[in-house]
Image: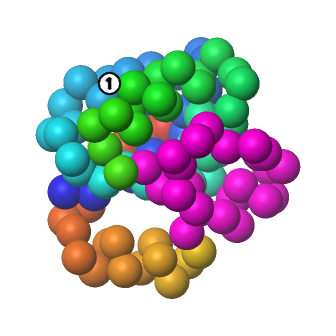
Amino acid sequence: MLYTINYASIGSDNLDSMSRVCPKNSPILFYEDGVLACKANTVMAGKMKALLAEHPVYALIEDVKARGIEPLVEGVKTIDYGGFVELVESHDVVPWLRN
């Protein structure tokens, strides 16, 4: 399963609720405002490091660039739209949308 997150911020529980149900080693893709959780040296960085210990984590580079999110937490891999399509083609998708 590929888990996708389009929104994750300090005031949202999206990241916490997803991490409770996401099976170990399932890839997680952050896109749209979800990439905000991938920024290094923030309150969210600790949660991201915990995810990286158990999952491959990806961030859509176009959304990272659009939001000026640099640097990213070490270990977060950036992918373009082609990489996004490859992940979707090779996994069932569980969208974790803004609540």
Q: Is residue 68 above or below residue 19?
A: below
Which x, y percent locates residue 42? 70, 22
Residue at image x 52%, y 20%? 46
Residue at image x 28%, y 80%? 89
- Find the magenta span and give its range: 57-79
Please give left or right for residue 72 compared with residue 56 in the image: right
Q: For the C terminus, which image quadrant?
A: top left
The image quarter containing residue 85 is bottom left
Q: Is residue 20 above or below residue 68?
A: above
| Label 1 neighbour load within 10 Å: few <14, some 14-19, many 20+ | few
- In terms of secondary structure, where does tag 1 sit? helix
The image quarter containing residue 23 is top left
Please give left or right for residue 4 compared with residue 30 in the image: left
Which x, y percent locates residue 43? 64, 16
The image quarter containing residue 61 is bottom right
Say what amino acid the circle numbered 1 marks: Ser
Q: Is residue 9 visible?
A: yes
Residue at image x 19%, y 65%? 92
The answer to which of 70 and 63 lies nearer the viewer is 70
The answer to which of 93 and 23 lies nearer the viewer is 23
Magenta-drawn stretch contains 88: no
Q: Is residue 28 above or below residue 50?
A: below
Which x, y percent locates residue 15? 43, 29
Please give left or right for residue 77 compared with residue 27 in the image: right
Q: Is residue 94 visible?
A: no
The residue wearing badge 1 is 17
Residue at image x 19%, y 57%? 1
Which x, y percent locates residue 54? 28, 37
The answer to which of 99 and 46 lies nearer the viewer is 46
Q: Is residue 52 above or below residue 29?
A: above
Please give left or right for residue 37 compared with residue 40 in the image: left
Q: How many marks?
A: 1
